[in-house]
Amino acid sequence: MITLGQSLDNITKLMKKLTKREILRELQKRSGLSQSLLNQIIDSLMEEMKNALDLGEKVKISNFGIFELKKTRPRKGRNLKTGEEVIIPSFKKVQFNLSPSLRRELHNEAGE
């Protein structure tokens, strides 16, 4: 029998995030480059990706996926406190689509 505490522990383990700091440490181990240099490289990469998305370009990383900026449509919503109907304006959001090769790899590992 699984208790609530055990369930929460399992959920916490599943929801762990890979942080920039962890990526930097792993890249430093693999490459031998300094963390400060790797940090500059990652920051430059992220800045280039943001600029491309801002210009309406897709960012394709082979064997990983495609980042693309999408604009949502305005929609009706409701103020939860007053119940009043409000219009939620359109906004931009980043959409990510897995590459077919990464999708296959993730599905095969999950199926084992």
Image: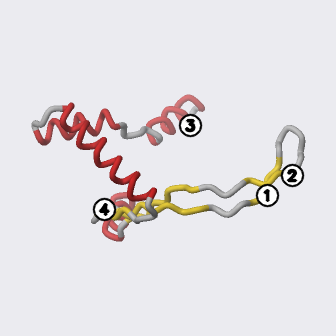
- Residue ID for mark 4: 61
Give yes or no for contact between labels 1 and 2 (Cβ–Cβ under 8 Å). Answer: yes
Instruction: Assign the C terminus to one quadrant of the image.
Output: bottom left
Labels 4, 3: front one: 4
N-terminal of the two: label 4 or label 3? 3
- Residue ID for mark 2: 85
Crowding near the residue tagged with mark 3, few <14, some 14–19, many ≥20 C-alpha atoms within 10 Å: few
Residue at image position (54%, 63%) is 70
The kind of residue tagged 1 is Lys
Q: Residue furthest front?
A: 55
N-terminal of the two: label 3 or label 2? 3
- Residue ID for mark 1: 76
- Residue ID for mark 3: 1
Distance between the Cα atoms at labels 3 and 1?
A: 44 Å
Instruction: Using the rendered view, name the quadrant where residue 28 is placed.
Output: top left
Q: Residue furthest left?
A: 32
